[in-house]
Image: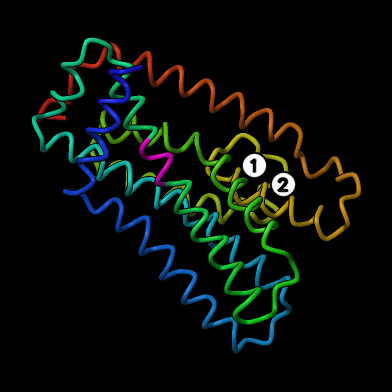
Amino acid sequence: MVAYYHSLKSDLMKLRRQPLLLIHLLVPLAGLGIFLAYFAYTPYTPVSKVSGYLQVIAIAFPTMIGIACAIAADQEASAGNYQQMLAQPSRLIPISSKLTLLLVLGFGSALLAVVGFGAGFLYGLDQSPYKLAFYVKAACILFGSSVFLYALHVYISLRFGKGASIGLGIIESLVAALLLTGLGDQNWIYIPSAWAARFIMSWMQIELSGGVPYPSELLIQPGILCCIGGTAAIMILLGGWFKRWEGRKSLE
């Protein structure tokens, strides 16, 4: 536990030389500012505005994850070709602390993007049909259903480089947008990049209906099982792979 604490402290100190913190702070602020300014003059219903904003955030999240993980891995490569991670007695400690830092930043960014928008929509524009607790829950759903992607992109960034992680993130965002249509009605539970958007939209439907039992065609229960099972599996696989990894060669 002491070694994990020191590794996490080291990763926190590295934030001074990375744009990670600024990205997780400025991008959500810019996004919610743009949408609040836009929604102040548009004639759409308040429910449609909230739904549209949450969909955009959920679709953009995979790209943001790809960029964040790519920056974190690239910093380790520049600081000695991953030797600070590979030289520790327990390989699980550095990968766990790195993933923890990314998850904490991601959760903070999700809260800022969603709850910040909710506060502005509720108290600034006075248009929100929901209370602030709704946006807190929405941020938790968005983040919780994206943990799988963090583990996946940490692996992709370490194994194949930042270009692969960012490129995959863009593709995942496009797939998430596509699966919000009827094409994803029966398939979204098997596509991790679609989990956040689909869970958010399904949960909003339940909230609007007053919490009545959700229709089985929403596939919420099997979706939750796939999300939890898939996230646990990729965490185990990531740890097992990193214990045997010897660093990325220049030719890779």
User: Residue at position x 72%, y 46% from top?
Assistant: 185
Mark 1 is on which residue type? Trp
Element class at badge 1 = helix
Residue 1: x and y, percent?
Answer: 36, 17
For the residues labelled 1 and 2, say whether their Cβ atoms are less than 8 Å apart. yes
Q: Front-most of 111 and 190?
A: 111
Local crowd size for mark 1, using a 10 Å CA cut-off: few (<14), some (14–19), many (≥20): many
Q: Write down the quadrant of residue 7 in the picture.
A: top left
How far apart are the alpha carbons under marks 1 and 2? 6 Å
Residue 16: x and y, percent?
Answer: 19, 49
User: Residue at position x 47%, y 52% from top?
Assistant: 61
Residue 38 located left or right of residue 141: left
**Range covered by the magenta-colored residues:** 101-105
- Mark 2 highlights which residue? 185
Q: Write down the quadrant of residue 27 in the picture.
A: bottom left
Considering only vertical position in the picture, is 38 above or below 203? below
Considering only vertical position in the picture, is 200 above or below 145? below
- Mark 1 highlights which residue? 188
Element class at badge 2 = loop
Mark 2 is on which residue type? Asp
Instruction: State the predominant SS element of the stretch in magenta.
Output: helix
User: Residue at position x 61%, y 23% from top?
Assistant: 229
Q: Is residue 214 magenta?
A: no
Q: Quadrant of the C terminus?
A: top left
